[in-house]
Amino acid sequence: MIKKIIDKYKAIPLGVKVSVALVICSLFQKGIQMVTTPIFTRLLTIEQYGQISVYTSWLSIISIFATLHLGGGGFNNGMLKYPEDRDGFVASMQGLSTTVTLLCIIIYIVAIEFWNNIFGMSTILMTVMFSEILFHPALGFWSAKQRYEYKYISLVLVTLFFTILNPVIGVIAVMNNEDRGTARIISSSLVQAIAGLIFYIYNFSKNRNFFNKEYWKFALAFNIPLVPHYLSQIVLSQSDRIMIENMCGRSYVGLYSVAYAIGMVMLMILTAINASLVPWTLESMKAKSYKSIGRMGTNLAILMAIVSLVPTMLAPEVIKILATKEYLNGMWVVAPVAIGVYFWFIYGLFGNIEFYFEKSKYVMYGSVCAAIANIILNYIFIKPFGYIAAGYTTMVCYLLLALFHYIFMKKICLKENIDYHIYSLKELFFVTFILIVLTACFMALYDYFIARYSLIFILLCIVFFKRKSVYAIMKGLKKHE
């Protein structure tokens, strides 16, 4: 009996094992966050919760400049380009990231008060932030290499360990300090920094190649043009909090952040699936398997549409569980943010093709345009309509992001003499239309509990009877031989 189970497990394609393992891991991560969110929303005031959210936003923005986001798209290209020396490439990227971060730390030290005023934070918080930025990329490099090589067991174990450790330390810190917002920030960043330090040492133990001229030249040429792109992504996901703080007040950031987190609840699942999709797409492009890429794109769009519906369906109940009644009005933010997650995935389909051809400037153009649109729309709509408007401006700008990158992907394909339409715009449009209609239906039924859950039951039945199709999608992500 046990032997049969083992044999069946061995027969499962590696890509399926990786995708399923990462999805389960992401579900566990999100489960831990969901369990601890009610604790923090009750231990912290709405303003303190907003303080944490604003800190996270600045951390995301500063990290782009201080690390060049070297663990992003260019890293996978490096894994593909230097298969014989991946440990050396990881060590070299770690060396480059360290160098850039130290330069940013020097810039901060030269004018500490100036930068503290700009970011609205104390020297202690800035020191903690730079500690995380210095060491945490090491964990990112190691994780990206594990995903690329389909070594999922160690990745899952490490991820789960630190996922549990972070909120545990956070609760202890918050309960034993009067300044609870600051305590939560410091505890979280220190856990991230320590986790990074462990893998910082480990990565260099595998290879001590701190500087490699070829690797640094490749990474700088690839990533520097992408800095505006990565910064634009942060603007799309984080600038609304900073603008809400300035235009509405920090307490509204707290209200928005809880609702936004619920809308983004499935992003971790999406990210886990995309972690398998990226190397698969790169290998498929290399093999010129364009038809399989397009078919997989449509199938995953359907799956992601279903996933994105989950937070929308349950928004009122989830907010009641995770937070106090003061947060309930935020349920109107959940749906547009969830659709934004779906558009973010669609953009990724097109972006993967751009990354394969190393067309950094096209990636940058699309992202910068969407980010500028986000700032303009936030400026126009947040003041008259309040913080809820930010959810809708984010959704619209993620749609623009997807459209811009589709246009640039088509332009690249024409330049590369690829006549085949890799993705079907008609199929993706149809999936998107159904998602928007169902989202509108659920929002209209927020006050009608029985009707809303009847619709949920119908959709669950459809998914159950189509479960074989879902498995087929995951099976398609197996690694190219």
Image (cartoon, rainbow, N blue to C red):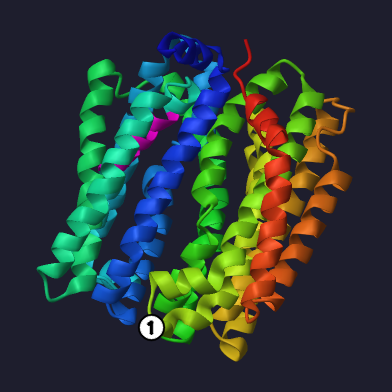
Image coordinates for residue 140, horizontal then vertical, percent: 38, 36
- The quadrant of the image that shows the N terminus is top left
- Which residue is at 64% across, 25% downward? 475
Q: Is residue 158 left or right of residue 280?
A: left
- Which residue is at 69% across, 18% downward? 286
Q: Can residue 136 be seen at all in this image of the molecule?
A: yes
Q: In this view, does 412 lie to the left or right of 235?
A: right
Q: Is residue 124 left or right of residue 40?
A: left
Given residues 336 and 459, the one toward you in this image is 459
Image coordinates for residue 113, horizontal then vertical, percent: 22, 71
Q: Can residue 344 be seen at all in this image of the molecule?
A: no
**Magenta residues, start to end:** 135-144
Amino acid type at image mark 1: Ser
Decide: is 347 above or below 473: below
Image coordinates for residue 440, horizontal then vertical, percent: 73, 71
Q: Name the residue under label 1.
A: 251
Q: Main secondary structure of the magenta part?
A: helix
Given residues 19 and 84, the one toward you in this image is 19
Q: Report if residue 355 lies within the magenta region.
A: no
Given residues 126 and 439, the one toward you in this image is 439
Tag count in the figure? 1
Q: How packed is label 1: few (under 14 Cα within 10 Å), some, or many (20 or more)?
A: some
